[in-house]
Amino acid sequence: MRIGELAGKAKTRASTLRYYEERGLLQPPERTPAGYRNYGDEAVQRLEFIDRARAAGLTLAQTAEILEVRDAGGSPCGHVRDLLDRRLVEIDEQLEQLRLLRTSVADLRANAAQTPPEVCTPESICRYL
Amino acid sequence: MRIGELAGKAKTRASTLRYYEERGLLQPPERTPAGYRNYGDEAVQRLEFIDRARAAGLTLAQTAEILEVRDAGGSPCGHVRDLLDRRLVEIDEQLEQLRLLRTSVADLRANAAQTPPEVCTPESICRYL
DNA sequence: CTTGACCTTCAAGCATACTTTAAGGTCCAT
DNA sequence: ATGGACCTTAAAGTATGCTTGAAGGTCAAG
């Protein structure tokens, strides 16, 4: 399978696959005599895995690490569990930050709704903020 | 006031202030005969405003726009209200995305807790994802 | 008069995940 | 043999908000 066909099956682009190879997510495939990349069917599964990892918010570097462990013959499962744990902590932190921000922006907005624009003096630039 | 002193008062760095000037957030100040930037006290307020805008999650481009309106003698308040409205919508969208992601990652993690690592076959790379 | 702290500009680097561009080779059909 | 679709590499561009580096000028103290 050439790169364009694999990209089609994975709903991505050839340029992305080359980039994944460069980043260590895809192993360098065989080449045809002309130098074209020649992928086997297992590459499709690998890209599906990469997509699931992305959906979980793992970085390409983290995903590459998992794949390297597997490629080296190891089992990355314990590591994956740790990554999921850390992701959960990160997500909770982000949620907290975002909730605080939401409160803050909503307060500013409510305040703006009550205050006529005239009270904004040039020195304060705009008192809505 | 020279740039280092202003940076100190605003708890930022001289390089940041130069960058703000380049981005249109700070007006080019007077220069001393030697070519040093020479700020007045009002610059401190302006930086405080910029900081409040940042705290509300406005981009530097949006903040620059507000300041330009004010510098042109206009009142940016209506615009600021719009920006706050849009920020609120964006934040709500991000919150929704993050909640969905949290659910998804939490499900993966719960599933991993129930499944022994042995069932992860090399073909699936790791079934925890 | 030298040292050191501070200032100047312009350009490039950082992090992330790609895309785009340039210049060129391959392959199949007509 | 020529056109078009597809492939190759290496480098640069995208977005955001800065920081860092290089090369050099200014100024007050000792």
Image (tube, coloured by chain):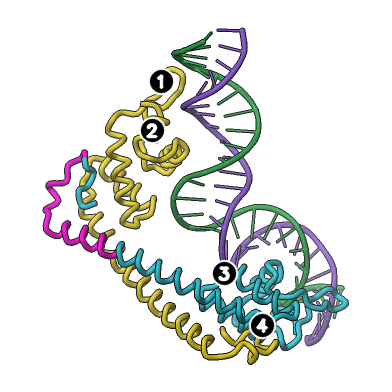
Chain colours: A cyan, B yellow, C purple, D green
Contact, CB < 8 Å: mark 3 with mark 1?
no
Q: Residues within 10 Å of mark 3 (few under 14, many from 20)?
A: few
For the residue pair A89 and B5, the one nearer the viewer reads as: A89
Residue that appears at 38% across and 33% down = B28
How far apart marks 3 and 1 lie (CA) works out to: 49 Å
How would you rate the neighbour count of disc 2 (Cα within 10 Å): few for under 14, some for 14-19, many for 20 or more? Answer: some
Horizontal side of A58 relative to A39 (left or right) equals left
Which residue appears at 25% of the width and 54% of the height?
Answer: B80
Question: Is residue A112 inside the magenta stretch?
Answer: yes
Image-quadrant location for residue A109: bottom left
Q: Which residues are magenta?
A: A102-123
Where disc 2 sits, the SS reads: loop
Q: Give the chain letter at badge 1.
A: B
Sequence order check, earlier mark of 3 and 4: 4
Query: Which amino acid is tagged 2?
Result: Pro
Q: How many marks?
A: 4
Disc 4 residue type (three-letter)? Arg
